[in-house]
Image (cartoon, helix red, strand yellow):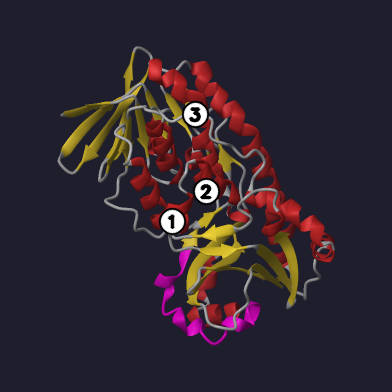
Amino acid sequence: MATVTTRLCVVGGGPAGMMAGLLFARAGIETVVLEKHADFLRDFRGDTIHPSTLDLMDELGFTARFRALPQRRVESFSGVVDGRNYRVADFSRLPTRNRFLSFMPQWDFLDFLAGEAGRNPSFRLIRRTEAQELIAADGQVAGVRAQGPEGPVEIRSHLVLCADGRHSRMRDCAGFTPRAFGAPIDVLWFRLPRRDGDPEAAAGRFGPGRILITLDRGDAWQCAYVVPKGGDAALRAKGLPAFRNAVAEIAPFLSDRTAEIADWDAVKLLTVTVDRLTRWYRPGLLCIGDAAHAMSPVGGVGINLAIQDAVAAANILAGPLRAGPVAEAGLARVQARRMFAVRTTQALQRVIQSRVIAASLKADAPLRAPLALRILDAVPMLQVLPARLIGMGVRPEHLRVPTQA
């Protein structure tokens, strides 16, 4: 069995894992990131880069190279109820440098992070290699055993960062079970062409028994059709024409292109889960991102929180990791730093899911815009509040760990 020795082993090459790998390697920490796929060209559910992440790109000195990547800027988000548009969030009012959301294919974002990380001699990305189990020694985690294209390999490390998603295998190996809070919805993802004359803003469209989110991706609309939990099978049983008609009714401007939904293979189910670990760590191991807390798609903030976890971990742990294994108290500091943001965000998501989204899906008569929506639309200055919660989060992190000279 081949053996690799490193200071840090990051399991998972998603946003949390790639950002952590970049930041620790930039700080001079020997870092190995394990990615089970050969590349990042997969159907990711989230393509949103938030202002707090854009600010981080600036802090890292990546501004020019990052902005050269193909992306779509969005400065506001609206709710459309019974055909009337209500502006909900205005990102242009944020008290930060980057006053917009950026929509970018996640594979482009991950490729960018991998390329920037690769500029550091301390960084190594090992693709087509899947972590199988943890290595234990002297009562703590000492690395992982993985399967690569040429056979099994051991990654020996002082710290393992579990960033392998909401179905984390390493989390299971560590004996952690997340506390599930339930979710009353699931989401069907699909794309339709975007044409001249279409609405400009990203929007959530509400009608009796139907909700459709439309996100501007430049040449296409990324669409999220919300259904009651477990409602996917019943919707598909009605047939594809009925689904096309439902999309056209909730978003009439799309009615001339719903035939582009050629078959059900073009419609992907996202099973919505909201959960979190009570404890994110054990000696030699720390969970971050979706492995520590699965977020609802409400607000599209899951990527943002995952990246903030990675920044907090690097800020707190890079210094101690240079000296050797990290004390359990350091791992606890990362969780304590991030837990308030996670709890608060999930609480807000759960309220919106139950009181706004689930209620709309149960309605069988024309909807009236909620009072909060009408107030936000009538008082533009208030639109910075939801923009701040979505775009910057409850506790945005800033880079504190210095670059290793």
Tag 3 secondary structure: loop
Mark 2 touching mark 1, by CB under 8 A? yes
Identify which residue is drawn at 16% across, 38% down. Answer: 151
- Please report the bounds of the magenta region as a residue range: 249-268
Q: Residues within 10 Å of mark 2 (few under 14, many from 20)?
A: many
Of residues 145 and 399, the one nearer the viewer is 399
Q: Residue type at mark 3?
A: Val
The residue that mark 2 highlights is 303
Query: Which quadrant does the C terminus fall into?
Result: top left
Residue 267 at x, y percent in the picture: 46, 69
Residue 5 at x, y percent in the picture: 25, 25
Q: Residues within 10 Å of mark 3 (few under 14, many from 20)?
A: some
Report whether 125 appears left or right of 260: left
Residue 321 at x, y percent in the picture: 41, 21
> Is 145 rendered above or below residue 126?
above
The circle on residue 401 is: 3
The residue that mark 1 highlights is 106
Query: Which quadrant does the N terminus fall into?
Result: top left
Of residues 398 and 97, the one nearer the viewer is 97
Report whether 144 appears left or right of 187: left
**Label 1, label 3: how far apart the Cα atoms are:** 25 Å
